[in-house]
Image (spheres, rainbow, N blue to C red):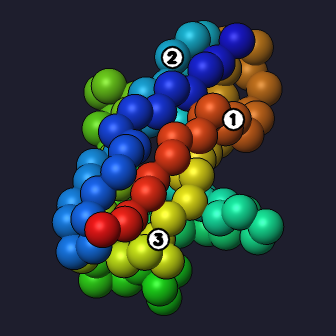
Amino acid sequence: QVQLVESGGGLVQPGGSLRLSCAASGSIVTIGAMAWYRQAPGKQRDLVAHITSSRTTYADSVAGRFTISRDNAKNTQYLQMTGLKPEDTAVYYCYALVTSTTRATLAYWGQGTQVTVSS
């Protein structure tokens, strides 16, 4: 069994910063791609940022403001968010493609953390 636990969400003023963390635990052999998605009320879940061992990609709406990173030794990924705007308000979900001790490679999701940007 594998779990992803997120932390770091909250309320921030426009222009402010937040750092989200997502720690994976359980019967992990290796983690491939990791990513952050977000879902605003009444909208679909959209990809925000994606990271593999060799590259990172970002949605156009966050490029230059958000930075995704990972610490493989800790099985943890991060999303540093700066220059936050009200339109960044959403529930943020982390994602990881995990190979477990069962040798199965499956996608796992965090429980979601609320980010609210408002004055």
| Quadrant in which the C terminus is drawn | bottom left
Q: Is residue 13 above or below residue 71?
A: below
Instruction: Give the label on residue 42, or none.
Output: none
Q: 22 or 32: nearer the eye? A: 22
Q: Quadrant of residue 66?
A: bottom left
Under circle 2, the secondary element is: strand
Q: Give the crowd class for mark 1: few <14, some 14-19, many >=20 residues within 10 Å.
A: some
Q: Give the crowd class for mark 3: few <14, some 14-19, many >=20 residues within 10 Å.
A: many
Q: Which residue is mark 1?
A: 108
Mark 2 or mark 1, which is nearer the start of the sequence? 2
Q: 116 or 25: nearer the eye? A: 116
Q: Which residue is mark 3?
A: 88
Task: Residue 85: give x, y in percent of width and height.
Answer: 36, 77
Q: Amino acid at mark 3?
A: Asp
- Answer with left or right where residue 55 lies relative to residue 94: left
| Quadrant in which the N terminus is drawn | top right
